[in-house]
Amino acid sequence: MTSERRFRPGAGLTVATLVALAILIGLGSWQVGRIPEKRAILNRIHVGLTTDPMPLPVHVDDPTMLDWRRVSLEGTVADADPLPVFATNQAGKGGYHLYLPVKTRFGMAVLVNFGWVPMDKLDVPLPRGQEMTLSGVFRTSAVPGFMSPENEPEKRIFYTADVHEMAAVFGLRTKEYYHFRVIADPWQEDLLPEAGQARVDIPNNHFEYAMTWFGLALTLVGVYVAYGLRRARKS
C-alpha cells in the first residue's frame, strides 16, 4: 500500500504517455536512420563535383543517375533570347539565371545555365549562334519548392528551372531535347553572366533532429514521473 501511494500517475495518463513516448522515440530513431543515407548522398555529390568532367552520354535514360556529375559537351548555342529564371547567386543576391539550348552533335539540345546576372543586366552578351565546348554540372529538372510561385511560360516568367517548360518556350519537342540541364562552369573571365552557379544546399541536420525528439521523450518521462509523485502525495 505504501509503495502505491508514492507514485500514482493514473491509468489514462500512463497510456497517453506511453503512446506519446513511442511516437517520439520512433521519430528520433527515424532521424538516426536517415544520417547514413544523407551522408551517402552528400558524398556522392562531392565525388561528382570533384571528378574530371565526363563526356555527355548520347543517351541518358535516368537523369538521376548522373545528377551532380560534372560533364563536358560540344554544340551550337541557340541564336535566341535567353530565358531568365529568377534565382540568387552564390552570394545570395537576387537576379536571374540565363538559360539557352545548346544543340549537341548528336542532334539533341541541352538546356544550359550560362550564369547569373543582376535584374537590370538581362542584355549581357552571350555566345548565341556560336559553336562552343563547355563543361558544367549535370542537374535534373528543378522541382518547385513549397512556397515557390508557379512559372508563367507564356510570359517567359520562371521561378523554377523546369526543363520541360523551358524547352517548350524555345519550341523544342519532347524528343528534341535532353530531360535534364547543365549548370555551366565559368566560360569567360570577370564578365557577366557569372557562371558556375551550381550550389549544394542540402543540410544534414538529422542528428540534431534526433536529439530533439529524444530530448522531448526524456522530458515527457520527467513530467510523467513528477506528476505521478505529486499526485501520490496529495492523495
Image (tube, rainbow, N blue to C red):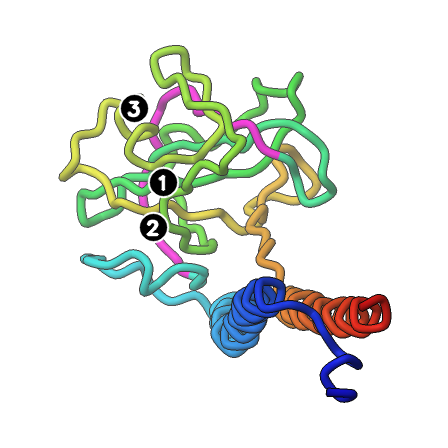
Q: Can I make out residue 50 in this image? A: no
| Mark earlier in primary sequence (2, 3) | 2
Q: Position of residue 58 (x, y in %)?
A: 20, 57
Q: Which residue is mark 3?
A: 170
Q: Judge depth for marks 2 and 3 and give the one in front.
A: 3
Which residue is rendered at x = 63% and y = 29% of the image? 117
Left or right for 69, reference 93: left
Find residue 74 and name its label: 2
Q: CA distance from mark 2 to mark 3?
A: 19 Å
Q: Which residues are magenta?
A: 71-87
Q: Residues within 10 Å of mark 3 (few under 14, many from 20)?
A: some
CB of mark 2 within 8 Å of CB of mark 1? yes
| Mark earlier in primary sequence (1, 3) | 1
Q: Secondary structure at mark 1?
A: strand
| Mark earlier in primary sequence (2, 1) | 2
For this rendering, which residue is in front, 114 or 49? 49
Q: Position of residue 95 (x, y in %)?
A: 63, 27
The amino acid type, in three-letter code, at marker 3 is: Phe
Which residue is rendered at x = 47% and y = 74% of the image? 37
Q: Secondary structure at mark 3?
A: loop
The amino acid type, in three-letter code, at marker 2 is: Glu
Q: Which residue is mark 1?
A: 131
Which residue is rendered at x = 44% and y = 24% of the image? 83
Left or right for 17, reference 216: left
Which quadrant of the view contains residue 63? bottom left
Q: In the orientation shown, which residue stands out farthest toward the top?
A: 155
